[in-house]
């Protein structure tokens, strides 16, 4: 009896141990499976996150996710760059944005749980890009709005877009329209004034006065025509017609000759001396000769126009540069341009002497704008330097691909 009982107990013990072992194995397996599933889930989450980050990093705009307490939870690389790599994750957005003009649309979106989009203009000192960026006033669109998420805490997504270039273009367009209207209004008012005199004061019978008035009116109508013509040239150069420039090789020297012939009467009546410094007679560039004639004409005419009463020497020259490009210059020893005016000299309608009487208006203020746009449309650059009374010099540089190989050889 006892041995049977002992045997039964032994079997039972073995069975219990086997079961316990089996359970332990099963539990281990289950644990391993659960851990593997966790790992897989974690990997999937990480890969989704890195895909999301990669996607958000391809945006041109700064993108941030901010929680309901105003703490930054995510920022793409553009946002990090914008705020100069200051640590921003887990920090309050107001501490990072610094300027309340940037922060307030975000605050409003978080507080009211609705989308807020706002255009923000910041002076240079307030730009988040910091003091080393010399762009002057900057313009931004701050767009913040609630983001639908399955997380319990609501998130607000913020997009910050740099619109400085668009803002500047718009500003230039507005200034152009305002300046053009102003410039056209003056000669028109003068013509209208004389017409009124002729009609209302019944001066038509007075032949001498009528002739005098008509001559003045013609001068001002010619001025209107010149302004309109110059504006059309600028608009053609800016409106992409630059891509349709009639590019052909031509000799710089012959273009210079054309210009000097056209200005011959002014040169001789002023007693000016022209010094030609054509270093390579056969220097040939590829470009639209019409615009190059205008470029050289405007530069030489300016030198003459600004210095009617001094013994003037104008130098016009061209030479190849070591990089295979070329340099073309016009210089004079006249009154020059004050250093304070130099940065603005290529702006439309900019004149050094702004207060002039009717008789003293010398140009449209568009000549150098045309010069700069035409040079740039040919892939070149123009620089100006001036020491009044000594030398005022305009230097045009053209890259190698605008100079034909014949003249490079
Ligand atoms: P404008 O058609 O009135 O000549 P520009 O754009 O050609 O206008 O020139 C702008 C201003 O730059 C001129 O009003 C003049 O004051 C100045 N300027 C240009 N070239 C010279 C120069 N060679 N010497 C002195 N001043 C110059």
Image (spheres, rainbow, N blue to C red):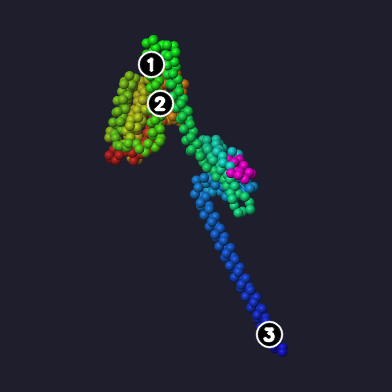
- Identified at 59% across, 41% down, the residue is 105
Q: In what element is the residue under mark 3? A: helix
Q: Magenta segment, which residues?
A: 102-115
239 up-or-down from 392: above or below: below
In space, the residues marked 3 and 2 are separated at their CA atoms by: 119 Å
Image coords of residue 167 (percent x, y): 50, 36
- The residue under label 1 is 214
> Label 2 CB, ligand 1: below 8 Å?
no
Considering only order in the chain, which callout, 1 or 3, is on the residue closer to the N terminus? 3
**To which residue does mark 3 refer?**
8
Q: Residue at x 32, y 36 (%)?
A: 246
- Image: 371 above or below 1: above
Residue at disc 2, secondary structure: helix
Q: Are marks 3 and 2 in contact (CB under 8 Å)?
A: no
* Residues marked 3 and 1 touching at CB (< 8 Å): no
Q: Kindly report which numbered mark, 3 or 2, lies closer to the viewer in this rendering.
A: 2
* Spot occupied by residue 192 in the image (x, y as percentages of width and height): 44, 18
In the image, farthest residue toward the top? 206
């Amino acid at each position: 009896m006892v041995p049977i009982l002992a045997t039964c107990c032994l079997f039972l013990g073995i069975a219990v141990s086997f079961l316990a072992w089996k359970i332990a194995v099963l539990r281990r397996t289950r644990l391993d499976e659960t851990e593997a599933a966790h790992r897989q889930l974690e990997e999937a989450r990480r890969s989704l996150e890195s895909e999301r980050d990669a996607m958000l990093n391809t945006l041109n705009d700064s993108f941030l996710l901010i929680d309901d307490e105003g703490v930054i939870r995510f920022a793409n690389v553009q946002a990090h760059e914008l705020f100069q790599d200051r640590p921003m994750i887990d920090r309050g957005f107001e501490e990072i944005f610094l300027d309340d003009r940037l922060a307030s649309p975000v605050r409003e979106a978080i507080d009211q749980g609705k989308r807020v989009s706002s255009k923000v203009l910041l002076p240079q000192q307030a730009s988040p890009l910091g003091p080393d960026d010399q762009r002057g006033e900057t313009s931004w669109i701050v767009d913040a709005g609630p983001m639908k998420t399955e997380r319990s805490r609501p998130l607000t997504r913020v997009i910050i877009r740099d619109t400085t270039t668009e803002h500047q273009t718009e500003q230039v367009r507005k200034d152009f329209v305002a300046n053009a209207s102003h410039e056209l209004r003056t000669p028109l008012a003068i013509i209208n004034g004389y017409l009124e005199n002729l009609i209302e004061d019944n001066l038509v019978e007075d032949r001498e006065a009528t002739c005098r008035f008509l001559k003045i009116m013609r001068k001002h109508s010619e001025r209107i025509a010149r302004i309109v013509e110059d504006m059309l040239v600028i608009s053609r150069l800016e409106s992409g017609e630059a891509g349709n420039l009639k590019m052909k090789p031509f000799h710089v020297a012959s273009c210079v000759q054309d210009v000097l012939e056209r200005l011959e009467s002014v040169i001789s009546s002023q007693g000016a001396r022209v010094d030609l410094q054509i270093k390579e007679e056969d220097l040939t560039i590829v470009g639209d000769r019409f615009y190059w004639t205008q470029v050289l004409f405007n530069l030489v005419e300016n030198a003459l126009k600004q210095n009617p009463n001094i013994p003037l020497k104008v130098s016009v020259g061209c030479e190849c540069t070591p990089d295979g490009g070329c340099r073309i210059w016009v210089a004079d020893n006249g009154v020059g341009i004050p250093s304070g005016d130099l940065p603005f000299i290529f702006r439309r309608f900019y004149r050094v002497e702004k207060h002039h009487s009717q008789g003293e208006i010398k140009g449209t203020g568009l000549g150098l704008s045309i010069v700069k746009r035409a040079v740039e449309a040919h892939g070149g650059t123009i620089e100006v330097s001036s020491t009044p009374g000594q030398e005022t010099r305009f230097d045009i540089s053209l890259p190698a691909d605008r100079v034909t190989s014949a003249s490079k050889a």
